[in-house]
Amino acid sequence: MFNLILFGPPGSGKGTQSEKLVEKYDLVHLSTGNLLRQEIKDKTPLGIEAKSFIDKGQLVPDEVVIGMVDSYFDLHKGAKGFLFDGFPRTVAQAKALDNLLELKKTEIGKVLIRGKTSGRSDDMDEKVQRNRQDVYKKETLPVAAYYTKAKKVASINGMGNVEDIFERLSAIIDKKMK
Ligand code: AMP
């Protein structure tokens, strides 16, 4: 298996790049944000709980997210690999992911971190946006340090258009897969 993490602040275009990468490398896209939005749409108990956090720009509790990822793994047993998008967002999630992958006798191949971006942000309430940025700095940036320590990180220049960035990401993956 070949597993990737796409890492970047809210509004850095992770979604678009993820869609392109999963297609090119035949990976299963695991976006916890998308999974949570689907749960909300379906009005499941998990979705109802998650919505109260998401609406405030807070993180959904680790155990909820980890349980969801675990179930998603079970649904995709034959996957060639996963592209994690918006997950892990805390060090506890990163450790849980390591454990889950170890059970599958695999690991994270690369963590792709997008550097400087155009600064474009989602169309969202200002206070919620500010909360999301604060949460990113406090809870999610330590995840980058966690993977840097494990020597798994590759940084990408985040300036330029979608195609420029896609090429940079692909070049790193191609090198790693060789
Ligand atoms: P996203 O679309 O990835 O930006 O996710 C939207 C929102 O869902 C986030 O602001 C969080 O409230 C929640 N969320 C998504 N992924 C996670 C995660 N891995 N851990 C905790 N909360 C998450």
Image: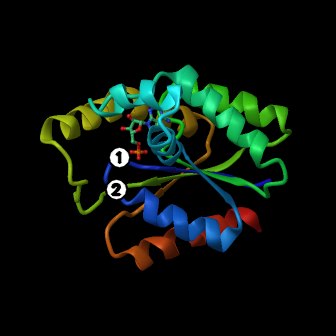
Left or right? Give the position of 176 relative to 134: right
Pointers 2 and 1 in contact (CB under 8 A)? yes
**Image spot of residue 171 (x, y percent):** 59, 72
**Image spot of residue 45 (x, y percent):** 51, 25
Q: Which three-letter amino acid code belongs to the residue tagged 2? A: Ser
User: Quick one: SS at disc 2?
Assistant: loop
Q: Give above or below for 81 relative to 163.
A: above
Asked where in the image residue 94 lies, by quadrant, the reply is: top right
User: Quick one: SS at disc 1?
Assistant: loop
Q: Which residue is mark 2?
A: 12
Q: Give above or below for 160 relative to 102.
A: below
Q: Residue at x 83, y 32 (%)?
A: 103
Q: Which residue is mark 1?
A: 9
- Toward the left, the furthest residue is 126
- Viewer-proximal residue among 33 and 84: 33
Q: Which three-letter amino acid code belongs to the residue tagged 1? A: Pro
Q: Give above or below for 87 relative to 176.
A: above
Q: Residue at x 70, y 33 (%)?
A: 70
